[in-house]
Image: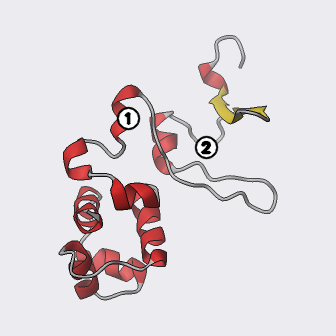
């Protein structure tokens, strides 16, 4: 499944095999072998591919993108998996491009950070809360 996912996501994002190979530091033939299911990418290549395609590694390996009609099968219900962000030294996080696009978050927007120790955190764009701006 991973081979057809790499091929599907590569084409969906408009990349050639050479583009992907260059970004990963492998040959075009290596990418072609992955797509043909002749070989499998190593774990670091999977990690980098997941970042390139803005999907989780689990989605890259186990989601059938060719039949789902969407990056995340739950998107039609308004639910998304945007991937993983790493917290920087000073507590900063990078919100994935697709999340910024879906929720129309732009440079300079103010975000409200909510938290519940038992349930986790949430980020809300202030402009989306009536009378809160």
Q: Residue 114, how many percent across, how many down?
A: 74, 31
Please indicate whether residue 55 sits to the left or right of residue 123 in the image.
Answer: left
Q: Residue at x 26, y 63 (%)?
A: 1
**Viewer-proximal residue among 127 and 54:** 54
Determine which residue is flagged by label 2.
107
Q: Residue 10, how many percent across, how many down?
A: 27, 64
Neighbor class of circle 2 (other Cα within 10 Å; few <14, some 14-19, many 20+) is few
Marks 1 and 2: CB-CB under 8 Å? no
Q: How many marks?
A: 2
Determine which residue is flagged by label 1.
75
**Viewer-proximal residue among 111 and 117:** 117
Quick check: 132 above or below 102? above
Quick check: 8 above or below 123? below
Q: Provide the secondary structure element on which disc 1 rests.
A: helix
Splitting the image into 4 quarters, where does residue 16 fall? Answer: bottom left
Q: Residue 116, how many percent across, how many down?
A: 77, 31
């Amino acid at each position: 499944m991973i081979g057809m996912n790499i091929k599907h996501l590569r084409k969906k994002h408009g990349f050639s095999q050479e583009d992907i190979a260059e970004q990963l530091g492998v040959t075009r033939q290596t990418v072609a072998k992955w797509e043909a299911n002749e070989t499998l990418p190593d774990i670091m290549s999977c990690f980098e591919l997941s970042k390139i395609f803005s999907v989780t590694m689990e989605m890259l390996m186990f989601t059938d993108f060719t039949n789902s009609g969407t990056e995340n099968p739950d998107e039609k219900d308004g639910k998304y998996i945007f991937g993983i962000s790493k917290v920087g030294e000073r507590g900063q996080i990078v919100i994935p491009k697709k999340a910024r696009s879906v929720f129309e978050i732009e440079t300079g927007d103010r975000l409200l950070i909510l938290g519940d120790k038992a349930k986790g955190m949430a980020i809300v764009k202030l402009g989306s809360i009536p009378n809160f701006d």
